């Protein structure tokens, strides 16, 4: 019976590929259609009236009349919507809000999820992810078992006294709204999947899923490893294939995968195991890895999202130039702006991307607009840090659990440097070599960092603190950010995160 179900669902999903090929071949026509639909739909909203949407005839008009927005600027409109007001940013009734992990701000953000964005963006992205996968791998038996999803939780929105709207991690919002047939092919049970207490949730997930025929996993690499290791502990298995012999796919996102790949290959020792990256953020589903042998992601252009970009070199200027898709160039870092069918308008999402191809449009995530180190003019971004730590791990046999880094500013006798806290699941066979390679690789891939490191004139060699196992788990728990979409901030231009971690470690040593 499972073989028949697998064939039927696979056949159905493959039909979407023709529509994907259409926007790959006609990207600007598709984006123009999306743009026109957004403006026409929202013209009678409060926002649409304020910025004259009825008079907008082109993207040029749009850029002249509507301001670029951060969350702080949209937050008053969103808060009113959370209190039950409607037709503020988007005309459809808003009954769900996706709560962000708050990596760019200490407090959480709440993103409206309209019926259109839920069905036509987030859920459509999930369907397309599988459509692309089964199109690439015709031998897949992914629907002969169940997909394990590691997500967050949701709760009633207390601000809405009448409407009963809810909020939660975007993964929880999606799971709570899946159709009946989709609930049947996923695990764990909805009751367990939506539990809010993370440690208890991991226990229940490990207990339930260890008895299931799991064929795919979707989640953030860090939290997925926590679950896999707990399953192995409970079952006594040496690797996860002894528990889930038909596992064939891990869909990952939110953090770069290369630093974690060696650990996954050790825990899932199969040459047939496949890995697939997606760009599914709280604000929308943006990209899917569509090729077998490349980690680039196809920018999904027909999800009700209109894209704009700002060259990162201009972002700090008073009046940065904003461009549309047809103006982007390959291998440049851009801050991404989105206008969506959930009511976000020219919203600066906080992520930076570079285009690896413009025919079709494929991207890689390079970092965050607020997560970088540029204390001395070195301009180190997350992509640099992840490449460097992957190289250092590979050369020293190390495997990481998590890391963060920040600048160490000039002291009375010392020049500046970068300070890292790294937690290993397997420590390097030579810690000094690891530290040296981390520094040398950063110099090789970032000329600004190299210039500041020349003869130690501005920056001294970086400093690495090795954190005991479990450090980042305890730190995230202390901050109330365990599980779900939450992730450790990789880089910061301030010492807010690293000082908090180092103080925690000092207290533990006393």
Image (cartoon, grey):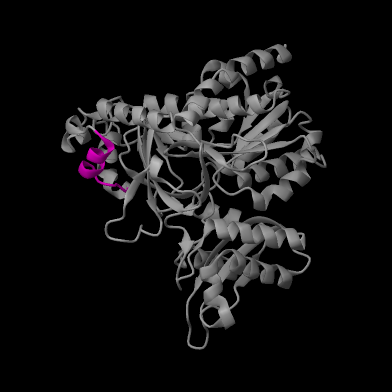
Residue 161 located left or right of residue 99: left
Nearer the observer, 305 or 323? 323
Numbered range of the magenta stretch: 58-70
Q: Residue 298's spot in the image, x, y percent?
A: 53, 37
Residue 482 versus residue 38 in the image, above or below: below
Residue under the image location 43 percent in, 28 percent down: 302
Viewport quadrant of the N terminus = top right
Decide which of 510, 502 is in the foreground and name it.
502
Question: In the shown orientation, is residue 330 left or right of residue 326?
Answer: right
Within the magenta stretch, is there residue 59? yes
Q: Position of residue 199 (x, y in %)?
A: 60, 44
Where 462 sits versus 395, above or below?
below
x 76%, y 28%: residue: 246
* On-image quarter of the C terminus: bottom right
Say whether residue 482 is magenta. no
Q: Quadrant of residue 64?
A: top left
In this image, 157 relative to 249: left or right?
Answer: left
Say which quarter of the image contains residue 229: top right
- Taking the image as drawn, is residue 208 in sight? no
- Residue 14 image point, x, y percent: 60, 19
Number of numbered tags placed on the structure image: 0
Kindly indicate the quadrant of the structure image that contains residue 40: top left
Q: Position of residue 176 (x, y in %)?
A: 49, 26
Q: Can I make out residue 448 in this image?
A: yes
């Amino acid at each position: 019976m499972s073989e028949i179900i697998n064939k039927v669902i696979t056949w159905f999903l493959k039909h979407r590929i023709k529509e994907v090929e259409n926007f790959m071949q006609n990207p600007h026509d598709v984006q123009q259609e999306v743009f026109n639909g957004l403006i026409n739909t929202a013209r009678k909203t409060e926002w649409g009236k304020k910025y004259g949407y009825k008079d907008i005839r082109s993207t040029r008009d749009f850029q002249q009349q509507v301001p670029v927005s951060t969350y702080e600027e949209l937050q008053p409109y969103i808060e009113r919507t959370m209190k039950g007001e409607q037709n503020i940013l988007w005309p459809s009734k808003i009954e769900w809000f996706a709560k962000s992990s708050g990596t760019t701000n200490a407090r959480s953000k709440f993103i409206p999820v309209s019926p259109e964005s839920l069905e036509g963006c987030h859920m459509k992205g999930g369907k397309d992810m599988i459509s692309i996968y089964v199109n690439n791998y015709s031998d897949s038996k992914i629907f002969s078992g169940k997909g394990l999803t590691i997500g967050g939780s949701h709760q009633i929105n207390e601000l809405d006294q009448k409407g009963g709207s809810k909020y939660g991690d975007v993964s929880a919002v999606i799971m709570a709204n899946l159709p009946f047939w989709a609930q049947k092919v996923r695990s764990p049970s909805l009751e367990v999947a939506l539990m809010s207490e993370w440690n208890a949730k991991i226990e229940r997930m490990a207990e339930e899923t260890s008895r299931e025929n799991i064929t795919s996993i979707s989640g953030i690499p860090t939290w997925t490893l926590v679950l896999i290791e707990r399953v192995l502990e409970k079952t006594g298995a040496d690797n996860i294939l002894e528990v889930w012999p038909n596992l064939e796919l891990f869909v990952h996102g939110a953090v770069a995968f290369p630093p974690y790949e060696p650990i996954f290959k050790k825990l899932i020792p199969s040459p047939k195991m496949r890995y697939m990256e997606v760009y599914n953020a709280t604000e929308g589903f943006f990209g899917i890895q569509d090729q077998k042998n490349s980690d680039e992601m196809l920018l999904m252009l027909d999800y009700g999202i209109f894209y704009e970009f700002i060259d990162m070199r201009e972002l700090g200027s008073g009046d940065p130039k904003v461009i549309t898709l047809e103006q982007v160039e390959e291998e440049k870092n851009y801050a991404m702006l989105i206008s969506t069918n959930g009511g976000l308008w020219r919203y600066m999402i906080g992520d930076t991307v570079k285009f690896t191809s413009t025919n079709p449009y494929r991207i890689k995530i390079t970092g965050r607009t607020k997560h970088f180190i540029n204390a001395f003019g070195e301009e180190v971004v997350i992509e640099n840090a992840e490449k460097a730590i992957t190289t250092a791990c590979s050369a020293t046999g190390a495997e990481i659990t998590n890391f963060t880094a920040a600048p160490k500013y000039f002291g009375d006798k010392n020049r500046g440097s970068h300070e890292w806290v790294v937690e290993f699941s397997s420590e390097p066979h030579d810690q000094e070599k690891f530290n040296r390679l981390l520094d040398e690789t950063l110099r090789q891939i970032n000329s600004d960092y190299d210039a500041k490191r020349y003869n130690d004139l501005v920056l001294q060699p970086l400093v690495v603190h090795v954190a005991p196992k479990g450090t980042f788990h305890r730190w995230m728990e202390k901050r109330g950010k365990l599980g779900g979409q939450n992730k450790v901030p990789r880089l910061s231009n301030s010492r807010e995160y690293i000082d908090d971690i180092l103080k925690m470690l000092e207290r533990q040593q006393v």
